Image (spheres, rainbow, N blue to C red):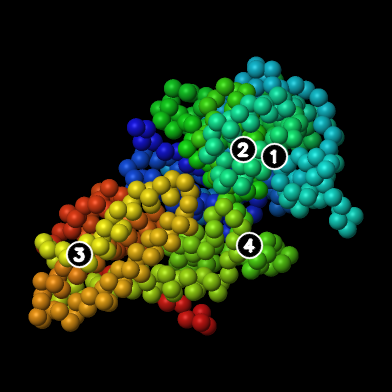
Amino acid sequence: MNKNFYITTPIYYPSGKPHMGHAYSSIIADIFARFKRLEGYKVLFLTGTDEHGLKIQREAEKNNKNPQIFCDELSAKFKDLTKILNLSNDDFIRTTETRHYKSVEEIWNRLVKSGDIYLDKYSGWYSVSDEAYYDKDEIKEVNGKKISTISGSSVDWVEEESYFFRLSAWSEKLLKYYKDNNDFILPSSRRNEVINFVEKGLKDLSVSRTSFSWGIPVPKNKKHVIYVWLDALTNYISALNFPNTNDINYKKFWPADVHIIGKDILRFHAIYWPAFLLAAKIPLPKRVFGHGWILSDDKKMSKSLGNILDPIEIINNYGIDQLRYYLVKEVSLGNDGSISMENLKNCINNDLANNYGNLCQRVFSFIKKNCSNKIPKVKNLTDIDNKLLDQLKNNVPNLIKLMNNQDLNEFIKTVVSYSFDTNKYFNDSEPWSVKKKNPERMQTILFTTCEQIKNISILLNSIIPKSTNKVLETMNVKKDNISISQINSLECFDHNKELKELNILFNKIEDDN
Ligand code: MSP
């Protein structure tokens, strides 16, 4: 069985400081990457920055900076964000690196060689903010300004010499690929969107620009720079050292298992990217997952509405696990979802502080007082204990399946319900009332609860790694034992070792906070 797993985030435009949308794509990808590692896979998790194109060139000019220096500064902020978000990425690619240039030039040369590229003239609409071409039926006029009906961003009329990619020639092959690979585009609503679009017929795509210079020059015609999306998409293979297809990473990790992206960049990933790869005779990725849009108080975040939520500010105030948990618990992954400070506070209090956090704290302090601070060893589990433990253990294959289908919301809902059930079990079993007349029973209750806490912590480890690692460390669970396969083992505790001290995991948020 292939135990390698390659997952990517979009590479971000370093045109401003990172915002919640960037944090969201990255956190989701990180959760899947970590979960696969817990499953025993060798994972390659890639993120990075998309540094060429007119959008970046203009932003650099606005700031009176040379574009390379501008990118160096802002890309560093995105790299910092990977630490702040506690991402477990294995690599961070920048499209201004030499390894990336080599890869893009090779793709270009292959497309030329296969006859998929020709020189002509482009005239049409272009959005610098989206770095995208739009057809005339995708444009409308609002207050005398032309905007794209797809993204709402403003467009300019462009006329210039351009190389074209024969995208139109690939429609049938793409449709066949979608049909043969049902799970290539997820969720399925997005898949239908793409199929409808391709079925209408594709037009050839302009893949070079001459009116600015900040990009990778077209080999053998330096007047042109390569279209930023052809450049950017190639990052997914340049990080594996393509064109060296004998490279160990390329062999192990290509084709990618999943590209995590936002729905706004689906067309690029589900149509252009596979078409480029087909033409360049490179295998296609296995999946593109398009998540929804994060809305702030039901509205799209924008500077003019003043409703942009800054992930770093939230993390400084509430904590990283709190933000990670909230984003994936409250927003249904494939759909748009609204977030608000009010809901964030409720979620932290109800799910984290009162439920999982409180369970750990109560149980560990009870063990400290009544069992010399050691997890008791027990032999006789009753039906009630087994029922609680088995409900979780027997569902592990299903939980793995949910994660592998990117059904994060159902996964969390189920695991949180186990935490509620365990709290209830602890309350109903009343270890405090049996400690004198039946200490053995008390020990069994404590062991069962600890076993559940360990298993819930392993399951939540990819979502809230910092806090669950603290809990597992408190229980002296070895790093090697933090894996999905350990959920079915009752042998992971050292009963002779005292529990470590656990500080409050999640502070409750008061109303005026
Ligand atoms: N550079 C391109 C991606 C190239 S990938 C080969 C790009 N960059 S971006 O910085 O504009 O956006 C990156 C990601 O952030 C996209 O997946 C986008 O969907 C996501 N988000 C930006 N704002 C968002 C929200 N408000 N909500 C959720 N995600 C959104 O596009």
Q: In which quarter of the image is the N terminus?
A: top left
- The alpha-carbon separation of the residues under discs 1 and 2 comes to 12 Å
Task: State which tag comes first along the sequence, 3 or 1.
Answer: 1
Residue under numbered circle 4: 295
Q: In this view, does 192 lie above or below 280?
A: below
Q: Residue at x 80, y 45 (%)?
A: 138
- The alpha-carbon separation of the residues under discs 1 and 4 comes to 26 Å
Q: In this view, does 434 lie above or below 296?
A: below
The percent coordinates of residue 124 (x first, y second) are 83, 37
Residue under numbered circle 1: 196
- The alpha-carbon separation of the residues under discs 2 and 4 comes to 24 Å
Q: Is mark 1 on a helix, strand or loop?
A: helix
Q: Which mark is residue 383?
A: 3
Check mark 4 vs ligand 1: CB closer than 8 Å? yes or no: yes
Answer yes or no: do the residues labelled 3 and 2 have beta carbons within 8 Å?
no
Q: Residues within 10 Å of mark 2 (few under 14, many from 20)?
A: many
- Frontmost of labels 3 and 2 is 3
What's under tag 2, amino acid-wise?
Ala
Q: As rendered, which of 89 and 493 lies closer to the eye?
A: 493
Answer yes or no: do the residues labelled 1 and 2 have beta carbons within 8 Å?
no
Task: State which tag comes first along the sequence, 1 or 2.
Answer: 1
Q: Residue 16 carries which label?
A: none
- The alpha-carbon separation of the residues under discs 3 and 1 comes to 54 Å
Answer yes or no: do the residues labelled 3 and 1 have beta carbons within 8 Å?
no
Residue under numbered circle 2: 270
Residue 454 appears anywhere in the view: no
Residue 463 appears anywhere in the view: yes
